[in-house]
Image (cartoon, helix red, strand yellow):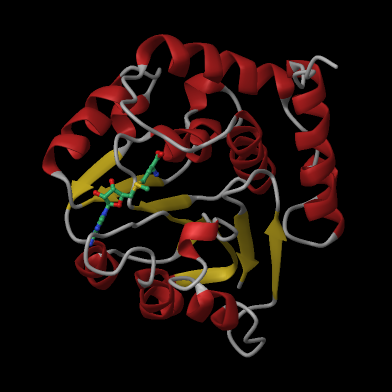
Amino acid sequence: MAATQTSEAELDEIAGSVIARLGQAGFCPPARAAFPSEGFHRVRDLIVERFQTPDTTMTNLACRVLYGLAWASRPETVLGLGTFVGYAAAWLFAPGLPALGAYRARRLIACDIDPDASELARRNFSQLPGGEAVEVLHVDADRCVEEVEGPIDLLFLDVDSPSEGKAGYARLLLAIRPKLASGALVVAHDITHPWFQADLSGYRTLVKDRSLFTASATLGVDPCGLEVTMV
Ligand SMILES: C[S@@+](CC[C@H](N)C(=O)[O-])C[C@H]1O[C@@H](n2cnc3c(N)ncnc32)[C@H](O)[C@@H]1O
């Protein structure tokens, strides 16, 4: 039997049900917890046409869920750590760029240690209407966490370093915890990826600490997975 591919409309629907469930669980306002299909497809056309993305493991469904979550929760300040050329972060940033629709974010910050990737991220973001507002910091994530001004409303973790892989997520989250706003969301990429199970075991334990975080949900949107945690 020929394999069937999930259609765009079906992916929109699945993303809608993921966001709706996050709304029911209190991760974002239930009233806005629907998938903003029109906005997403407009942004996607721009990103596909204009971004240079040498490599990414972000799937079509994960991109939708990131966009829908930011659209629903409207974070004032968004920080991405390990943003490479900006592809994953773009879905979280786009709803906060007024020319693209939903609201005006106060600060959209992307951080990566790789100078060439940071340069390309800067170029990529500048291809989005109003995208010059995105601050691309070419800096080590530990230093960024130390120096960045809070409160942060949405944090995205995707740092994968040659020395420790993804094991830095837990340290970074603990270090930035005092700067996370009440109700802030933390989205960690690759939480279910088989390669990173050992690296991320400390992180999985940390997000279950109810003295630090209100709730956490593992979204099996693809083999990489997303962990969404609320302060
Ligand atoms: C998996 S890639 C990120 C992929 C990306 N988020 C995307 O849009 O598809 C991991 C990134 O972590 C960055 N990285 C590694 N060590 C870092 C560090 N100490 N501080 C900041 N970024 C770091 C790498 O340069 C790389 O771009």
* Relative horizontal placement of residue 76, taking residue 12 as reference (left or right): left
* Relative horizontal placement of residue 14, taking residue 143 as reference (left or right): right
Give how far across and how far down residue 37 sits, in percent: 72, 22
Give how far across and how far down residue 77 sits, in percent: 45, 52
Q: Is residue 219 above or below residue 83?
A: below
- Give the residue furthest to the front: 1
**Residue at the (42%, 80%) spot, across then down:** 174
Q: Is residue 52 above or below residue 35?
A: above
Image quadrant holding the C terminus, namely bottom right
Give how far across and how far down residue 29 sits, in percent: 77, 52
Q: Count the marks: how many? A: 0
Q: Is residue 85 above or below residue 212?
A: above
Quadrant in the rendering for residue 148: bottom left
Q: Is residue 53 above or below residue 59?
A: above
Q: Nearer the viewer, residue 125 or 179?
A: 125
- Give the residue furthest to the bottom: 211
**Residue at the (39%, 51%) spot, across then down:** 80
* Relative horizontal placement of residue 147, taking residue 204 as reference (left or right): left
Q: Nearer the viewer, residue 105 or 160?
A: 160
**Residue at the (80%, 18%) spot, across then down:** 4
Give how far across and how far down residue 50 sits, in percent: 37, 12
**Residue at the (35%, 26%) spot, across then down:** 131
Image quadrant holding the N terminus, namely top right
Quadrant in the rendering for residue 85: top left
Q: Nearer the viewer, residue 225 or 23?
A: 225
- Give the residue furthest to the left: 115
